[in-house]
Image (cartoon, helix red, strand yellow):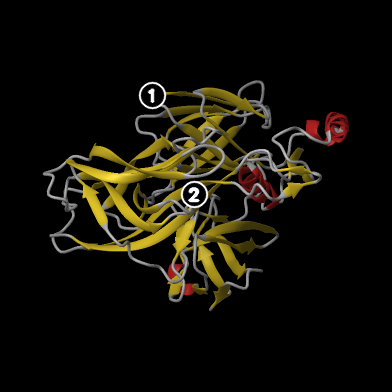
């Protein structure tokens, strides 16, 4: 159970609203929200919050292990609802357990959350709770999320009824077959290697729907049904039937589900598609979260690719928490390459873009490093750069990208990029009251701007 309280004049109100939106979009979270009219960054409705805690600790349902759960951890060793995880490897990162149930789970890793690449050289040993018949034989079916053939491994439950197995961190869809494991429904595999699927508006887009059979026997007459309550999502085709999916096999339905998306200007807009999979008496429904790029999607007014180059650019600095600010010059050396300002095979680079007008009235013609999104197989984000947003009081960071172009990228290859950068402002309105009091401190506001950049390799 989660309760969020916001004072209307709290200077970090935008962060409260973004947190509220995240919880409000997650139906599995028992969530409530309260806003009070108050002019400062103080806790309000304290009595109600204590009453909420009393209700939460008295809720016996929260002590009952769920039939299915998700869990993420940055620690090499952790446990959740009796599932024990022990991992090793030289590189730190996150371990994600998704759709964990008695019949199976998905295990993945990320160098950073929520959209980093897998953690290299990670070995993960998982011990289940005592859910299985002591001494019984089980089959573990392991399907790599990156594609390829699934593998089977024989397991024997311990005298305590636990199963234990070891995998790497590349990403796996795992299922158990044996006494008490239950009949698994068809599984929707991830539609994107990142946190969500990012799509362009105004064009027919084939949805990358892949359906996996986690069983050791065929699945027949598998029905796939898509729906969305979002008016910005138009599904050109909403259902199909797969005659048969062999054991441990994935069927790619990408060409069968074209969709058309509509967007306004500004930032990425969220949307959601529900995918229902059924076969016989088993079924599962999974939500696919989307981010629709804005329309129109402008190109940057100016671009600098730092492939080992050094440049000096004007950047914006806020004056203080009562508003105002000005440009200052910053000298930057980033990337690895020949320094000619072109992204070439084998090089690492950051991309800086010039913004005619940022969120703050005084932020004009300044430069920002971009977060880079691309579905090109030749381009990978090898580091997420985190920088303090100058006088940002919360410690929230500006996130941007260091990317690498594969040395094997063919000459003349076109690569389309979506570039997202954040601008910010101390927004102060001294004439506005919250309740009976004037605003005590400027709001910390931020927004993202999205651009498109099309590159063609030399």
The residue sitting at 53% across, 39% down in the picture is 139
Q: Quadrant of the C terminus?
A: bottom left
Q: Residue 362 versus residue 351: which sits nearer the camera?
A: 362
Q: Residue at x 67, y 58 (%)?
A: 283
Observer-nearest residue: 400 or 6?
6
Relative to 413, does residue 395 appear above or below in the rendering? above
Judge left or right: residue 90 versus residue 201: left
x%, y% of residue 231? 62, 73
Q: For this view, does 29 lie left or right of residue 149?
A: right
Secondary structure at badge 1 equals: loop
Identify which residue is drawn at 73% across, 39% down.
66
Which quadrant would residue 222 be assigned to in this image? Answer: bottom right
Q: Residues within 10 Å of mark 1 (few under 14, many from 20)?
A: some
Image coordinates for residue 240, horizontal then vertical, percent: 56, 73
> x, y percentage for residue 293?
46, 64
Question: Residue 89, which numbered label?
Answer: 1
- Left/right of residue 57 with respect to residue 238 in the rendered view: right
- Res 125 seen here: yes
Residue 446 to residue 229: above or below: above
Q: Nearer the viewer, mark 2 or mark 1?
A: 2
Q: Position of residue 357 (x, y in %)?
A: 41, 58
| Residue furthest to the front | 431
Q: Dot 2 surroundings within 10 Å: few (below 14), some, or many (20 or more)?
A: some
Using the numbered discs, state the Cα–Cα distance from disc 2 to disc 1 in whole angstroms: 23 Å
What residue is rendered at 71% in x and 47% in y?
28
| Dot 2: element | loop
Mark sitting on residue 413 = none
Task: State the residue in front, 97 or 202.
Answer: 202
Which numbered disc, 2 or 1, marks the residue that appears first in the sequence?
1
Q: Looking at the figure, which quarter contains the N terminus?
A: top right
Residue located beneath label 2 in the image: 195
Q: Quadrant of residue 15?
A: top right
């Amino acid at each position: 159970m989660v309760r969020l309280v916001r004072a209307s004049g709290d200077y970090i109100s935008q962060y409260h609203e973004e947190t509220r939106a995240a919880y409000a979009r997650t139906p599995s979270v028992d969530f409530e929200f309260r806003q009070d009219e108050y002019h400062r960054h103080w806790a309000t409705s304290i009595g109600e919050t204590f009453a909420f805690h009393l209700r939460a600790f008295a809720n016996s349902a929260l002590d009952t292990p769920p039939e299915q759960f998700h869990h993420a951890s940055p620690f090499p060793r952790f446990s959740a609802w009796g599932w024990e995880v022990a991992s090793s490897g030289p590189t730190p990162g996150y371990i994600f357990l998704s759709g964990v149930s008695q019949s199976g789970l998905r295990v993945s890793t990320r160098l950073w959350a929520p959209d980093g690449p897998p953690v290299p050289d990670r070995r993960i040993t998982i011990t289940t709770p005592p859910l299985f018949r002591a001494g019984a034989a089980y089959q573990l079916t392991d399907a790599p999320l990156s594609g390829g053939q699934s593998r089977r491994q024989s397991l024997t439950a311990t005298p305590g009824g636990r199963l234990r197995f070891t995998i790497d961190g590349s990403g796996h869809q795992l299922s158990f077959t044996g006494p008490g494991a239950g009949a698994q429904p068809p599984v929707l595999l991830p539609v994107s290697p990142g946190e969500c699927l990012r799509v362009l508006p105004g064009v027919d887009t084939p949805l990358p729907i892949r359906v996996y059979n986690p069983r050791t026997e065929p699945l027949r007459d598998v029905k796939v049904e898509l729906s969305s309550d979002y008016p910005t999502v138009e599904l050109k085709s909403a259902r199909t039937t797969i005659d048969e999916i062999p054991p441990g096999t994935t069927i790619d339905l990408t060409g069968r589900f074209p969709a058309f998306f509509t967007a306004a200007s500004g930032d990425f807009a969220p949307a959601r598609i529900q995918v229902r999979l059924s076969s016989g008496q088993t079924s599962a429904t999974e939500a696919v979260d989307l981010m629709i790029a804005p329309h129109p999607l402008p190109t940057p007014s100016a671009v600098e690719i730092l492939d080992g180059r050094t440049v000096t650019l004007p950047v914006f600095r806020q004056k203080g928490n009562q508003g105002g600010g000005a440009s200052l010059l910053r000298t930057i050396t980033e990337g690895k390459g020949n320094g000619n300002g072109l992204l070439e095979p084998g090089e690492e680079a950051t991309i800086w873009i010039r913004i005619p007008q940022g969120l703050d009235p005084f932020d004009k013609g300044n430069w920002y490093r971009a977060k880079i999104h691309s579905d090109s197989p030749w381009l990978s984000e090898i580091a997420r750069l985190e920088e303090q947003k100058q006088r940002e009081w919360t410690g929230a960071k500006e996130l941007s990208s260091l990317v690498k172009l594969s040395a094997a990228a063919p000459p003349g290859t076109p690569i389309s990029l979506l570039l997202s950068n954040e601008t910010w402002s101390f927004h102060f309105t001294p004439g506005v009251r919250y309740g009976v009091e004037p605003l005590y401190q400027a709001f910390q506001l931020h927004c993202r701007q999205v651009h498109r950049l099309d590159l063609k390799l030399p």
